[in-house]
Image (cartoon, grey):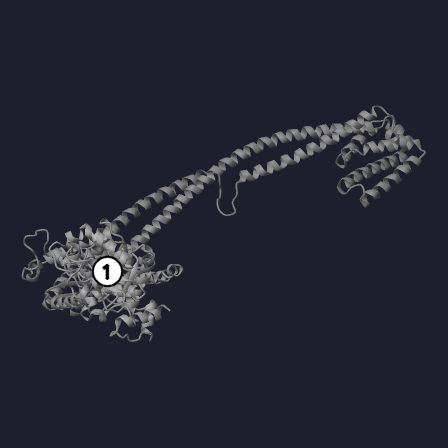
């Protein structure tokens, strides 16, 4: 059992591989099966195309080629980026195919007073019953305008105009009339547009010129009333400059005021410290050092006046020379102190110049201190002379006076700065207004210049007449354009091929037959018991059985035997019936060969001919047909007499027996069930050869009374619906379907037995079989094969 269960896994891969091949080659198989239909329709289409080309009415095509460009490159540069855009060509195409152009061309009369509307070759194509279609519509429908050239000149700015008509001369005449009307319309339209443009531009010129005069007048009046003498590059706002100068002076006064306040505070503090104290000459000099150098001259003058007011006569009488020396030394010391303050503020206390002055001051002070002459000291600071305290107080007075002067000056400057700021702001408004008016004048001047230039361009364009319209190829007598024998033949051929393929697929789908073994297995969903091809005729009897051969067909029968053998040996399956969907599927041949195959493994097999309407089993086993199943069911014969041995070892036969008019009723009797049980007890396997399921009801009567049913499918003729209907009937009747055998005779290459284990028989493994001794030789060969 283990060996039998392991082997079926190998065929599974083979079946999946076959399925993939079927999917890939299905279209080719359809084409192969329907090749004659496709070939017939292809030839028919080709013949129809050629016949149409020979019989159809001839049409002629007249063509012309037009170049469209602008004459003025200067005009083009100002109005568009390119000389001719795609939309310009599109507009010309629309114009050529319009009813306006074609209608005027058709309505124009010749010297004889005739128009193209009444041209006989045109009128014959019009249907009087259709009023909405006239000669103009006919010409438009048969005209074609294509832009661009041919070959390498596909981007050329040309139009190819063609007209198809049944008369070659009339085709040329119609196309010429359309092109002439188109040319006249284009020239007239451009002329009208130029005149209108000229009028519009002149009107705009006058309007812009008036606006320019108004703007210039306003600007002139503004300049006359503006508080400015000159405006241009390098000019400035005088009030802004004045305001800046006043602000700078105010800042200087604020700095001076801050300096004076600082000095005043220091001097007042020193005066509070003096408060009537008597100071030495050196201390007096230190106090007087607080006075800045700029005030020394004023204080010197003040001191001179005070000394002059004293008792000059007595002073001069006693010490004239020494007093003068004392004053000189005093003035020199004051000067040194003032210079020290200046240098110290500028360079710092450690600067060499400051240190030199310090040394000199110390020497002067030392000289004064060492002097023992009182007259020298009293001369400058005597009772009636000026002392340091009075000088400092005078210095405070000077500083207060300077503060008052600065405050008064600040008030004056603030008033002047406010007025200058107001004047500057007013002047800025004048300047902004001036800029606006000047720009307005400039814009009007530019607009005026542009209008004048456009007017010049329009004058030039009116002389050039807009577009360059040149016929590169004038309309010529129409050349034959249709029908074309090659095109009609090719079209008919393609139509025939398409129709052939369509009908081939539809016919193949409608056919409903199986196209491959994989499709059969997928449809029926039953275990495959093998695929057999052409088998020997039943006329040869037992000698025609192939069970003992080494061939693909015999191996297929062994496959079915192998799959059923486990259940047969375990007695789970003691009887089986072999049937088919329709007559001629090969069920009787399969039955006889299956029986011989089972007998080769040592089983005793009984074949019962259950086809009471068309019995054939006796022919396969070369036995007499008389006395069989019918006789057993009617009770006219004993069982032992009905069982007939055959030349095949282990195979016995019960023929159909005498003919009857009620085969279904006989098979439905209880005696068949009893007979089946008796036969199952006497033989290892009982095989019933049953009639087709769709032909009669006999197999449906027998199916529930046996252990299994095998369906034989003829791939060349069986339809899907027939097979599925057969399976459904057997299943509904209570039968047990155990597998199917595929008869591939005449079914094509998709059902071939090549490949797999069948390939052995195409590689020198097959050898002739002696069919003159079927019983003995078959058993010997089978034993060797199993070994």
Residue that lies at the very extreme toward the top in this rendered image: 276
Q: Is residue 166 left or right of residue 502?
A: left
- Picture layout, residue 709 above or below residue 432: below
| Residue 147 picture location, percent across and down | 24, 61
Q: Tell me where residue 244 sits by quadrant.
A: top right
Q: Which residue occupies the foreground of this view, 388 or 347?
A: 347
Q: Is residue 158 visible?
A: no
Camera-nearest residue between 454 and 438 = 454
Say above or below: 177 vs 732: below
Query: Where, by quadrant of the figure, is residue 10 drawn?
Result: bottom left
Residue 527's x, y, as percent? 30, 57
As helix, strand or loop, the secondary structure at mark 1 comes to strand
750 and 369: which one is in front? 750
Residue shown at 88% from the left, 35% from the top: 326
| Left or right, residue 293 beside residue 485 | right
Give x and y (percent) for residue 113.
Answer: 5, 59
Placement of the N terminus among the 4 image quadrants: bottom left
In this view, 770 is above or below 583 = below
Residue bearing mark 1:
712
Crowd band around label 1 with a 10 angstrom C-alpha radius: few (<14), some (14–19), many (20+): many
């Amino acid at each position: 059992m283990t060996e039998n269960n392991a082997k079926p896994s190998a065929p599974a891969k083979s079946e999946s591989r076959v399925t993939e091949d079927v999917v890939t080659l299905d279209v080719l198989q359809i084409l192969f099966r329907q090749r004659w239909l496709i070939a017939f329709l292809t030839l028919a289409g080709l013949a129809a195309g050629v016949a149409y080309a020979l019989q159809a009415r001839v049409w002629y095509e007249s063509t012309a080629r037009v170049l469209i460009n602008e004459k003025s490159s200067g005009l083009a540069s100002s109005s568009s980026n390119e000389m001719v855009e795609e939309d310009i060509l599109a507009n010309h195409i629309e114009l050529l195919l319009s009813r306006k152009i074609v209608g005027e061309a058709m309505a124009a009369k010749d010297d004889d007073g005739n128009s193209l509307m009444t041209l006989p070759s045109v009128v014959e194509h019009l249907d009087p019953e259709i009023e909405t279609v006239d000669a103009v519509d006919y010409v438009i429908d048969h005209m074609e305008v294509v832009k661009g050239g041919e070959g390498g000149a596909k981007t050329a700015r040309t139009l190819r105009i063609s007209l198809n008509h049944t008369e070659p001369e009339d085709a040329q005449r119609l196309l010429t009339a359309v092109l002439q009307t188109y040319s006249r319309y284009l020239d007239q339209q451009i002329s009208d547009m130029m005149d209108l443009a000229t009028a519009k531009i002149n009107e705009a010129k006058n309007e812009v010129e008036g606006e320019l005069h108004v703007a210039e007048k306003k600007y002139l009046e503004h300049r006359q009333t503006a508080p400015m003498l000159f405006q241009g590059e390098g000019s400035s706002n005088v009030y802004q400059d004045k305001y800046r100068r006043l602000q700078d002076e105010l800042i200087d006064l604020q700095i001076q005021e801050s300096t004076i306040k600082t000095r005043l505070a220091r001097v007042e503090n020193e005066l509070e410290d003096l408060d009537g104290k008597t100071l030495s000459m050196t201390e007096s000099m230190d106090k007087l050092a607080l006075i800045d150098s700029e005030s020394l001259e004023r204080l010197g003058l003040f001191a001179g006046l005070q000394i002059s007011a004293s008792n000059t006569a007595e002073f001069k009488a006693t010490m004239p020379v020494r007093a003068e020396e004392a004053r000189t030394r005093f003035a020199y010391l004051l000067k040194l102190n003032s210079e020290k303050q200046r240098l110290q503020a500028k360079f710092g206390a450690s600067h060499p110049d400051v240190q030199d002055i310090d040394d000199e001051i110390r020497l002067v002070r030392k000289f004064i201190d060492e002097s023992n002459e009182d007259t020298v000291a009293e001369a400058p600071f005597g009772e009636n002379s000026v002392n340091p305290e009075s000088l400092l107080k005078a210095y405070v007075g000077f500083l207060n006076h300077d503060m008052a002067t600065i405050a008064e000056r600040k008030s004056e400057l603030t008033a002047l700065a406010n007025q200058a700021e107001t004047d500057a702001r007013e002047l800025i408004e004048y300047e902004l207004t001036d800029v606006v008016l000047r720009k307005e004048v400039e814009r009007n001047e530019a607009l005026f210049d542009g209008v004048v230039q456009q007017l010049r361009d329009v004058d030039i364009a009116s002389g050039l007449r807009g577009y360059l319209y040149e016929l590169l190829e004038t309309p010529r007598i129409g050349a034959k354009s249709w029908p074309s024998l090659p095109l009609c033949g090719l079209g008919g051929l393609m139509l025939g091929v398409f129709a052939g393929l369509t009908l081939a697929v539809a016919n193949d789908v409608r056919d409903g037959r199986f196209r491959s073994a994989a499709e059969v297995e997928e449809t029926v969903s039953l275990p495959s018991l093998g695929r057999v091809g052409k088998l020997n005729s039943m006329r040869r009897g037992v000698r025609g059985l192939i069970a003992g051969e080494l061939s693909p067909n015999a191996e297929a029968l062994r496959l079915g035997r192998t799959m059923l053998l486990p259940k047969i040996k375990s007695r789970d399956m003691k009887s089986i019936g072999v049937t088919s969907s329709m007559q001629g599927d090969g069920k009787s041949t399969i039955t006889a060969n299956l029986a011989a195959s089972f007998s080769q493994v040592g089983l005793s097999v009984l074949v019962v001919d259950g086809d009471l309407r068309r019995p054939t089993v006796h022919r396969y086993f070369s036995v007499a047909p008389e006395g069989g199943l019918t006789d057993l069911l009617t009770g006219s014969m004993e069982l032992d007499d009905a069982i007939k041995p055959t030349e095949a070892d282990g195979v016995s036969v019960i023929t159909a027996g005498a003919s009857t008019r009620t085969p279904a009723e006989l098979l439905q009797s209880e005696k068949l069930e009893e007979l089946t049980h008796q036969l199952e007890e006497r033989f290892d396997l009982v095989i019933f050869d049953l009639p087709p399921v769709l032909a009669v009801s006999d197999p449906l009567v027998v199916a529930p009374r046996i252990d299994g049913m095998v369906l034989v499918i003829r791939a060349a003729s069986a339809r899907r619906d027939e097979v599925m209907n057969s399976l459904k009937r057997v299943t509904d009747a209570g039968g047990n379907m155990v597998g199917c055998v595929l008869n591939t005779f005449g079914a094509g290459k998709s059902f071939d037995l090549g490949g797999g284990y069948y390939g052995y028989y195409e590689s020198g493994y097959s050898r002739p079989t002696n069919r003159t001794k079927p019983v003995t030789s078959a058993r010997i060969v089978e034993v060797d094969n199993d070994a």
